[in-house]
Image (spheres, rainbow, N blue to C red):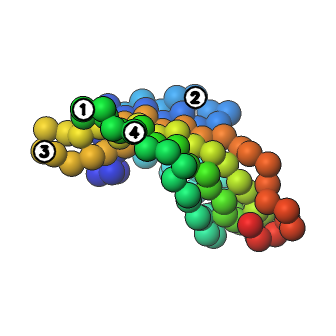
């Protein structure tokens, strides 16, 4: 959770906004408890802009998850992340959201 700003907001698809580190922790705890597991993830940054203590990045992601039935499923998503530089000079996740994009051809492995 140290990667997240104390005032971070996570906007996961189909879920309520998670406001702050503890709510974000609970979001991911619930996701992992539901039986889903990330098998692999590749992320390609498509843009990045810096303005003062904020940086905005977009990326395309591809990977595979394993569901509760142990079947691997390919996914593809796009994301928008805002980073904020803290008083200590470290960059942390400040706002984070993503949504699906068309899955890669071939089904099982992006």
Q: Residue at x 13, y 38 (%)?
A: 87
Where's residue 36, x and y in %?
A: 66, 59
Q: Determine whether the residue tagged by mark 1 lies in a helix, strand or loop.
A: loop
Precedes in sequence: disc 3 or disc 1: 1
Which residue has dot 1 on it?
A: 52
Where's residue 17, x and y in %?
A: 52, 29
Crowding at dot 3, Cα within 10 Å, few <14 / some 14-19 / many 20+, comes out as few
Viewer-nearest residue: 62 or 48:
48
Relative to 57, is 36 above or below?
A: below
Residue 52 occupies which quadrant of the picture?
Answer: top left
Q: CA distance from mark 4 to mark 1?
A: 10 Å
Q: Is residue 31 left or right of residue 74?
A: left
Q: Residue at x 39, y 39 (%)?
A: 49
The mark lying in front, picked from 3 and 4, is 4
Relative to 73, is 10 above or below?
A: above
Crowding at dot 2, Cα within 10 Å, few <14 / some 14-19 / many 20+, comes out as few
Q: Residue at x 56, y 59 (%)?
A: 43
Q: Residue at x 52, y 39 (%)?
A: 80
Which residue has dot 2 on it?
A: 16
Q: CA distance from mark 3 to mark 1?
A: 15 Å
Precedes in sequence: disc 3 or disc 4: 4
- How many marks on residues? 4
The mark lying in front, picked from 1 and 2, is 1
Q: From where the camera sits, is residue 92 visible?
A: yes
Q: Determine whether the residue tagged by mark 2 lies in a helix, strand or loop.
A: loop
Precedes in sequence: disc 3 or disc 2: 2
Q: Which mark is residue 49?
A: 4
Q: CA distance from mark 1 to mark 2?
A: 29 Å
Where's residue 1, x and y in %?
A: 34, 50
Where's residue 26, x and y in %?
A: 47, 43
Crowding at dot 4, Cα within 10 Å, few <14 / some 14-19 / many 20+, comes out as few
Which residue has dot 3 on it?
A: 88
């Amino acid at each position: 959770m140290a990667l997240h700003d104390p005032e971070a907001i996570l906007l996961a698809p189909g879920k309520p906004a998670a406001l702050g580190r503890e709510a974000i922790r609970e979001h991911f705890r619930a996701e992992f408890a539901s039986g889903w597991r990330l098998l692999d993830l590749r992320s390609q940054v498509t843009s990045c802009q810096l303005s003062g203590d904020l940086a905005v990045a977009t990326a395309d992601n591809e990977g595979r998850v394993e569901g509760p039935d142990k079947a691997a499923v390919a996914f593809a998503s796009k994301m928008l992340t805002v980073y904020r530089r803290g008083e200590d000079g470290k960059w942390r996740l400040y706002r984070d959201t993503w949504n699906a994009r068309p899955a890669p051809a071939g089904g099982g492995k992006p």
